[in-house]
Structure formats: structure tokens, C-alpha cells
Amino acid sequence: MGLELEYGHGQTPINEEEKEGLLLKHISTQEELNEAEQLNIEEAIEWTLSNRFNAKEILSEAFVRELHKRMYRHVWQWAGAFRHSDKSIGVDWKQVLVKLRGLVDDCLFWVDNQSFPEDEIAVTFKHRIVSIHCFPNGNGRHSRLMADVIRSHVFREPPFTWGGRDLTGKGPNRTEYISALKEADRGSMVKLLEFAKG
């Protein structure tokens, strides 16, 4: 029996080739996959908490990939590898590296020059990296953890709460989150900032 996935509002489907990268062959449902991924993500969070990183280390292609790898390495063979297919969201897959390098350079400039408030820098980075959609899956969770790492390691503030609830399933919290992302797509970070801190 193959892996049967149910996608919530705003979640990007993975293709059949990407599904082949599942390392845990006993998993067959969305619930089992979510549980396995969450355990791996908690391990990645622990790694971020037990290490010290500076802005230059965090705002690099290497760190972006390493964080994704640590979040999903026990679940997906392609953890930490950029996608090789186009999705319903994100840049053309051949542009991922170029756009990511532009983003990390921009963010280093924002940090060095205090271009706007610290929370806005972290949330703007989150919004832009999820818009690039670097990886086959896990981009939303990865982008939120990147924002938390920027906030905690660069600005020495506690991680965001992101509404205080699970955003992987269906429900009002995810709907509010997607609405905030769509407003950010239109150029206003207000709702996304409020959601991150709420």
C-alpha cells in the first residue's frame, strides 16, 4: 500500500518521485507521517537551542539546507536538497539557488543596517523564503523555524509563538495563517507579524 496524503489549505503536494524518498516505509497515512516528521523537527529544534550561531552563519545557503536536513533527515531521503520540480507556489525550480542567495544577502544587509524592526526582519525572511519554496516539502515549517532562529540567535529574543497551535492540519488557526501569508504577498506584513507574535 502506498503513501496516501491529504493536503490542507495552502499545503503543496509532493509528486510521486518525491514520495519515493520516504525512508520510513511502514508509514501509509498523513497522521503517521505528521507524527514522524514532528519527532524529527523536535530534534532539529533541540539542535538550534544547543548551539550558538551568528547572523552570517544563519543567513547562508549552507545553514538553510542544514536546518531542513535536520528537520526531515530521518523521514525523507531528499531532506536538505533543493526541489527538482515546479510546484503550485514558488519560483521556477531552476531559480531556487539564485533567489535564496539574493534573500540571504538582503537579510544580512537588513540586520547590519537595522533596516527595519527586528521582528519584521525575521518575519520578512520567513515570508520570502517560503515564497521561494526551496524544498519538495516542509517549506512552511522550515520557514517558521528559520524566523525563530533569526529571532533567538541574531536578536536574542524568544522564538515566535505562531498562534500557539499546530499549523499542519485543517482548522481556524491555519486559515488565519494562510490569510496572513496572502496579505504579506500583497505587501503588508502586519497580519503575519501579529500572527507570529500571537
Image (spheres, helix red, strand yellow):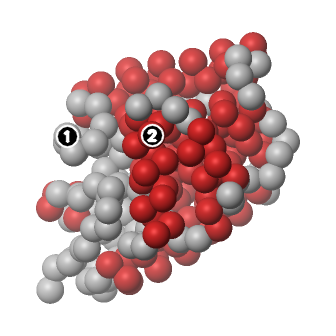
Q: Position of residue 75 (x, y in %)?
A: 41, 68
Q: Label 1 vs label 2: CA separation?
A: 23 Å
Amino acid, disc 2: Glu
Extreme-right residue of the structure:
156
Q: Where is residue 7 in the image (x, y as percent from the top left)?
A: 27, 68
Instruction: Say if residue 182 shows up in the picture.
Output: yes
Task: Name the residue carrying label 1.
Answer: 86
Residue at x 21%, y 77% (from the top left corner):
3
- Earlier-in-chain disc, 1 versus 2: 1
In terms of secondary structure, where does tag 1 sit? loop
Q: In this view, does 1 lie above or below 108?
A: below
Q: Is residue 112 above or below residue 189?
A: above
Numbered-mark total: 2
| Label 1: few (<14), some (14–19) or many (≥20) C-alpha neighbours in 10 Å | some
| Label 2: few (<14), some (14–19) or many (≥20) C-alpha neighbours in 10 Å | some
Instruction: Say if residue 53 shows up in the picture.
Output: no
Q: Position of residue 155 (x, y in %)?
A: 81, 36
Viewer-closest of 185 and 112: 185
Q: Is residue 90 above or below residue 8?
A: above
Horizontal side, residue 151 vs residue 133: left or right: right
Viewer-closest of 180 and 19: 180
Horizontal side, residue 73 vs residue 52: left or right: left
Q: Is residue 91 above or below residue 194?
A: above
Residue at x 85%, y 42% (from the top left corner):
156
Residue at x 54%, y 56% (from the top left corner):
70
Task: Name the residue carrying label 2.
Answer: 183
